[in-house]
Image (tube, rainbow, N blue to C red):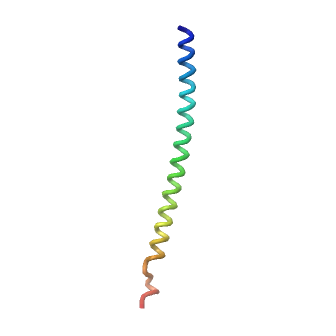
Amino acid sequence: MEHRIIELETRLAFQEIALEELNSALISQQAQLDRLEKECMRLTNLLAETLAPRDADRP
């Protein structure tokens, strides 16, 4: 019985470590996604500004 408890405790410890690693990866990926979304919005605005007719260009 004691062997089974030790085995379960060992598995739980490994699962906790894996969960912490997955959480860290998720946090990192979310930060990267936030940066990419911000950059995409910046580029979208830049493109819109570039393609929009300007008052100075009108006759």
Q: Position of residue 51 (x, y in %)?
A: 45, 76
The vertical placement of 44 against 51, above or below, is above
Q: Position of residue 3 (x, y in %)?
A: 57, 11
The vertical placement of 44 against 55, above or below, is above
Q: Position of residue 11 (x, y in %)?
A: 55, 22
Residue 51 is left or right of residue 11, and the answer is left
The residue positioned farthest toward the top in the image shown = 1
Residue 24 is left or right of residue 51, and the answer is right
Q: Residue at x 43, y 77 (%)?
A: 52
The vertical placement of 13 against 40, above or below, is above
Q: How many marks?
A: 0
Q: Residue at x 56, y 17 (%)?
A: 7
The residue positioned farthest toward the bottom in the image shown = 59
Q: Residue at x 42, y 91 (%)?
A: 59
Q: Residue at x 55, y 19 (%)?
A: 9
The vertical placement of 49 against 55, above or below, is above
Q: Position of residue 49 (x, y in %)?
A: 47, 74
